[in-house]
Each structure stands twice: as C-alpha cells, then as structure tokens.
Amino acid sequence: MELDDEKMQVDDGIDEISPMTLGHYYQHLFPHALYYKWLNYNGKLATTEYTHREFSFTIKDGIYLRYQSFKDSEEFQRELSRLSPSKIDIGAIFTAPPKHAKSLQPGVFKPVSKELVFDIDMTDYDEIRTCCQGGDICAKCWRFMTVAMHVLDRALREDFGFTKIMWAYSGRRGVHCWVCDERARKLDDPGRKAVAGYLSLIRGGAEQAKKVNLSQRNAQHPHIVRSLEIVEEYFEDVLLVDQEILLTRDRWTKVLNALPDEELRKIMDAQWSKRPDRSSVDKWSELIDAVDKRAAKKGSKFGLSTFERDLMLQMTYPRLDENVTTHVNHLLKSPFCIHPKTGRVCTPIAADQFDSFDPFAVPTLAQLLREVNEAPVHSGSAAKSTSMAPYIGVFEDFVSTVLPTPTGSQPSLDF
Amino acid sequence: MFNQRAVKKEGYPGEQTAVPEVVRRSRYPCRLSMYSDAPDVEVSIEEFETFALDRLQVLRAIEDAQLRAKGEDDMRKRVNEALEKHMPSHTNRSKLPPRQLVGERRKDHVSHFILRLAFSRTEELRGWFLRYECALLKHRFQNADLAEKQELLSSAQLRLAHLSPADRGAKLGNASSFYAQQEQLFEVDFERVLDLVGRSQVVLRAGRAFVPQSEVATLLIHEFRHTLTQALSVCAKALPQMGEDERLLPVLQNLSNQTARSEYQSTGAAGAVTAESVVGLSDSFPLCMQHLHSQLARDHHLRHGGRMQLGLFLKGIGLGLQDALVFWRRAFSAMTDDQFQKGYAYNIRHNYGMEGKRADYTPYSCHRVIMSNPPGPGDHHGCPFRHFSSERLRAALHKDSLPDPEVREVADLAQAGHYQVACTRHLELRLLHRRQNNQPQPDADIRLSAVTSPNQYFDLCLGCTKPAPPAAGADTASTAAAILSGAPKAAAAIY
C-alpha cells in the first residue's frame, strides 16, 4: 500500500474531521476485511446476512441516509470513499436489500434478524454522578461503565448462554454491546424486550426517588445475587470515595429522599448539617448504622432492612436504554467509526479489559493520520503501525469466534 | 386414553360419574380448547352472528374488568358473570344433558374462529383480540379442575420433562433455593417463557429457563399466544378472499367496529388551538400532561419520550403543525434556530405525517402511557398515578387545592394499581370543586366513565368548565349537564 504520494501535510487540516480526513481513515485505517467477515457471518462469498443488511450514513450537514445496502465489501468501500460519512449506523438484516425497499410492496420488506444490542449512556447517570454532566466524562465516572460491563457480560454469558459478545466504546460517553450469537440475532421484539426487562433494575423517572425496589423473592434471584456481589466490590470506591455522593447537602438530600422513613430522614439531615464536612464514607456508615438500628426496632415491613442493598444497586447497577434493545430494526453506531464530537475511534473493548480500558487513551483521527504520515512505508496494513493496532487485535479475536468453524487451513486474517 | 378414564372411577378428586358416553364420542370431549383446528361444522347465518357477538361481549367484559376490578377475586367474579351470561360452559361432571354440553363447546369453538377472522384485519385489532383471548384462556385454565388442566396440557403438546432432583442440584446449584423445595421444575428454552424471563420470575442457566409447576399456565398461554399470532397473520391474508360471500363480510366488519376504540377521536372542544393558547388550556390537561408542560417550561427542554407524549396530545386537542413548530421553538428557548431545525423540527413534522412513511400518528391512549415505554432516569413522561412515588403524587394532588381526604382517596386508588380510575376520580373531584364554586351543592357528586385517553380527559374537563353561552348554546349546556350528572349515555358518546 503506497502512501508516499498521499501523505498529508502537517498543516493540511489534519486536525479537522472533514470528508478529506475521514476519506483517508476509511481508505487506510478502517479494518474492512475483518468488518466484512463479521457482518457476513461467513467466508468470502457474500450472503444475505451482508447484502440485506441496512446501514445508514450521516453526511455533510447532518443529512441522514437510511436504507443503504451493499452487495459486497468493495461496494461498501466505494460508497464510503464517495460519501465520507461522519457517522455509520448498523441496522437489521431485512427480507430484501434495503436499497430496494421503496420499490417493494408494503408489508414485503420486513426486518428478519439483527444482533442483540445494548447501549449504556453516561447521561443516564447524570442524577448520580457529581464529577461531570451531559457529554463530559472523566476517569472517575467512567467506572460506572466498568461496573455495567461486568454485570451485563456475566449475565449474558452465564444466564443466557451467549458467547459471541463484543463490547465497544461509543467514542464519547458510553459503551455498546453487540451479542452476535445466532440465537440472539433471531430474537423478535418481545424476546428482546424480555431480555432487557430481565437485565433492568432501575425503574422510575425523574419523580421517583427510590428506583430499585426489590421484593424478598426478587432479591434471591441468582442474577440479582451475583450483580449485588459485583456492585459491592465497586460501590465504596466509586460512589463514596470518587463521587463523594454525601458530601454536600444537595447531594445527601437526594439519597435521603429514598429513605422510606421520614423521621429518620430529618434526623440524618440534622446530624450531617451540624458537621457537613465529613467524608461520604463516614456518613454512609453512619447512615447504615442508623438504618439498621431502626430496622431492628421497627421490624422488616418498613423497607429499612433492604435499604442499603436497594440503594447500592440504584447507584451502581447498569442503566440501560431499553428502547435500543427492544426493537429489531433499531440502528446503532458501528464500531470503528469516528465520533464526530471527539474524533475518537469507536473501538472494541475485550472482555478482560473492562477494568483497564481507558477511554482517554483511545486514538483520535488526527493522531492516527499523523502516525500514518510518520510511519515507515511497508507492505501490509497501515493500521498495524499505529495506535489502532491493539484494538484491531481485539476485533480480530472477536471475529474469529464469530466465523463458522473452518473447513480448511485458516489463512492469516488481513486487516 | 378416553377408554382408560371411563373405566377408572377413582383418581380424580370429586369425580362421581364417568364422562357421558355421548360427550366422549362427540367432537368436543373436553371443555377447554387451544383452538388449534378450524371448525368443520355448519352454522346458520344467525348463529354466525350471535355466537360471535356473545363471545365479543365476554372479551369486552374482560377488558372492562381489567380496568375496574378490585383484586383477583373481583376479577374472577366479573369474568365468570360475563361467561355465565353470554357463553356458559360446564364441565363433564355436571349433570347437564350431553347435547347441551356439546352445544356450549361448539359455540365456543366456532365463535373463536369467527372473531379470529373479524379481528385479523389490522394490527391494532389483532393485538386487541390476542390480548383478551389469552386473558380468557388464562382465566378458564386457572379456574378449571385438575382433570381439565391435565387434558389441556397434554393436548397442547408442550413437550415438557420434569427435572429430577439430581439434575436439579447439578444444573442449578445454590440457585435451586429460588424455588420451593418441593416444587417440580421443567427445563425449557428461555424463549418459551418470555413473560417470566422479563419479570425475573425464573432462573436462567445457559439459555435454559427453569419453570416451576405453578407457572405451567404461563408456558401454556405463551404457546397459545405464539400460535394465535401466527394464525392471525394467516387469516389477514385470507380475508380478501372472503369477499365472495356477501353475507359474511358486513357481519365481520360490524364485529370489529364494536370494540372500545383505543384511538380516541377528539371532539374539537377547544376550537382552534394556537401556540399562545396552550398555556391557558393547560388547566384542563390531565395530570400527566400538566406535569410534562410544567417541566418543559422549567427546563426549556424535554426528552424524547416526553416530547412524543405531550406533542401528540397537543396535536389531538387541535394544535396544528405550524403552531406546534412555533410552540416548541419557543419552549426550547435555550437553543439556536439551527439546532432546533436539525434536531427537533423534523420529528415534529414526522408526528404530523409530513415526513418519512407519512403515518399520521395518533395521540397515546392511557393504556399506552401506562404500559409502554416506562420512564427512565431524567424522564418526565408516563402516568403520574403509576410512575410517581406515592409522596410525589400526593404533593402534585395537593397543588390542586384538594382537601386531604380526597387526596388520600385518589392516592389509594393509584397505590392499588387502578391508575385510570384514580385519574378519573381526580377529574371528578376537580370538576366538582369548580362547579361548587359557582353553585354550591353539598351532597353532589360526579361520576364519569373511566378515562381511557388524555385527550378524552381534556375534552371532558373542558366541556364542563366552559361557561354555557347565554341563549344559543343550549346544546353545550345540556351535554355538560349530562356529563356532570354522570349520565352514562352522554359519557359513552364521548368515547
């Protein structure tokens, strides 16, 4: 792959996300061969898994093109070059190539299958996190994502028996999960809704102070028991130490509002108002002590004995957007596209990297293009010589699990 | 199989006589059915219509009971009453003449299939039929005797195998304690018990669900729903061919028009609604929409769920597309024109059928607001009677200056799960207070039919608040008076 004549000048707009820079990315860095192998779920010959798949492109000033489909990887690459989309979404596999959708009888064009997907967005934690809000993230609140990945990954594997799971960084403030087992892909909307329901614990809009309310029976469910164990590992560090969830009156009021006992709420509020500067760790242990004592006096009917457990879950358990999971034809951002706001690549996250993954170490488009410029020219993929290499390695491992068992010798996968 | 039962006189508790021979040999030896085979009997055109209407009455009674019943016993009582009245069916052990038993079952069988045809036409009708047929089967199964349950289960061919205690320990380990020790468990693919999975009522291991004996009914209903869903799609395709028989189509159409439409048609009571007049009309909004409206005013923003719920409601009360664009643009005061155009204008036009597949979206019914798309953190949509914490709900009710006992009455109804009844009571109390401010009447009360959609609430509320115009407005006054006195006919006419 000769890059000399295409090397970009340093001041050539390399820092912008433009059709030009995106074009370079798609041409030299995007792992086309692996991507095709994944979505084709098969060897070299294109199947309807690939040709009937809907993609959507966002181009130029926010123009959104749906029902894109391609007959093979070459066509996909040509269109990418032509359009340089700032965003690529992956949709469902339909009964016919989506680009022919409009010419078909209504009712004939229907979704057939799609990966089972999950979207965890940091803005759903805005009412809990104290370090950032909205589109911002930092190392402290990122740990909510870590917990989410641990909890959900275990459930998907142990309870549902899924094995072909790929987690991906969304490029800005969240993570996505792609479950690619055939059984998962075949699930209809009610099936997806049931899986989402099984995995959801946080129930309630802005007007619900206490969003986790487990009955005694629910709490014994193995998924809850296991999730609680995981949550307990992270709760103190993440919520008490990092987030200091009880440090100020504003913050502790939110937590106290979830207490079912109004008198106790007033007592704790008064107690903390007298000496507000104590750490959240200390305040929490005081709170739990007080709750336990009161529970012992009043008996178990008053929701006090389950308060600690329910609150820990409310603050730490994954918050997933059920709408994204429920509908088979929902489109989700593709791995390996560039996030338009941050310039970061949407990279896969390996199952053993949940704790070590650092969203701030993910390469940006500008960084990658500079690296490509500075790398010595050699045959083989340009991506291998850049910071993309480890992420492509993760993708390669994942794709090899997704392909059907090889009948002959497996040539080394090129990028 | 039947021969064995005729001989074995013990075995089933309470069985006194064997199944009458005539019934046993007939087409309908069992009372309960999964309706897997289409009837191949002949019916007269009168039977065709009356059978179907009677069954429809039963299904509508179940719909009504689900809204109003105060607990499971009350629910069971109401459904049984409806069945007794319109479609009685007796067990093989009753002393009735065999001909009557067979006749009852024939009616059950035939009527199901007629309604299947009638309700296969649109997705909404199919959904309605599916929901209440499943509810009916569930009711009948739960109230059947052991013999009937076993008959139905074996005819359904569920392919269930009990888990041996050794297997139970091996496959579940500690999780086995989630179930009662003595409860039998079945192992099935999780896709067959989605209801139980979604509510975490079963343990899952590697994609297999462990279903306790007590939930076998769920498994049954699930299979039934699955099969019936497919059958309805098949029926929908077969419908056009029915055009040949001119007698049947009108009957079928008439049947499907009789359901309480979930699509409420606005009466246009508010006249022309402009972006400016929304605020003034908000006094007549139901609690869910008042909440969304005030949050919008406070935050200058609403998330998607809220925009849809409020936006479609406003469309329903008469806010046109241009006025809607102005309304939302002004409400989202913190963003630039460009941001509004790109992010939000398209969706508003989409709701009015001006984009994409040009579907004209209808405002949400209460059922949809309560059941679909529950609010997540940061969301303000949903039904306050369901989705607010009980304290928050009381606070919202107090804002209306309702006295304590009345707030408690409404909150208790909500707590008990009667969200629509609570909302309707709330409306009744508000109207009563408004009316009494004009003409105090100490022993007056208002009783309305249960509100089934926010737009219906709005029309009712507005209709009773508008001062009756002096001379020519006799009609409005009498409609309002009729509503206030709770005349069922006037209220029914509204929906």
Image: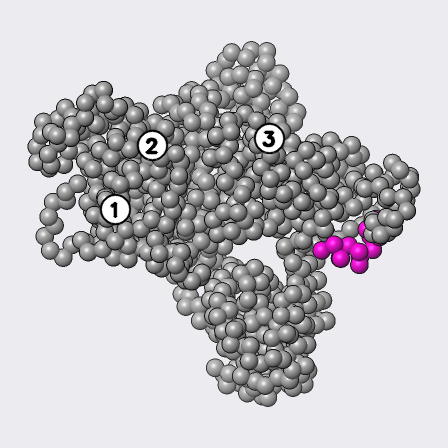
Quadrant of the rendered structure where residue B48 is? bottom right
Tell me the tag on residue B331.
3
Along the line of sight, which residue is nearer the eye, A288 or A403?
A403
Tell me if I can see residue A220 in this picture: no
Residue A60 higher or lower than A220, as above or below: above
- Identify which residue, B449 or B323, lies in the foreground: B323
Q: Distance between the residues labelled 2 and 1?
A: 19 Å
Q: In this view, does B448 lie to the left or right of A133?
A: right
Q: Which picture quadrant has residue B321?
A: top right
Q: Where is residue B182 in the image (x, y as percent from the top left)?
A: 48, 57
Of badges 2 and 1, the one in the foreground is: 1
Kindly identify which residue carries mark 2: A339
- At numbered mark 3, what does the secondary structure look like: helix, strand or loop? helix
Report the front residue among B425 and A26.
A26
Magenta span? B481-495
Q: In which quarter of the image is the C terminus of chain B?
A: bottom right
Amino acid type of the residue that numbered disc 1 sits on in the rendered structure: Phe
Q: Mark 1 lies on which chain?
A: A
What's the CA distance linking mark 3 and mark 1? 42 Å
Residue drawn at the location 34% of the way across and 59% of the way down: A96
Q: Earlier along the polypeptide chain: callout 2 or callout 1?
A: 1
Placement of B240 over or under B74, stated as above or below: below
Q: Are dots 2 and 3 on a single chain? A: no
In this rendered view, identify the residue nearer to me: A334 or A264.
A334
Q: Is residue A204 above or below residue A263?
A: below
Residue denoted by label 1:
A76
Type of the residue with mark 2: His
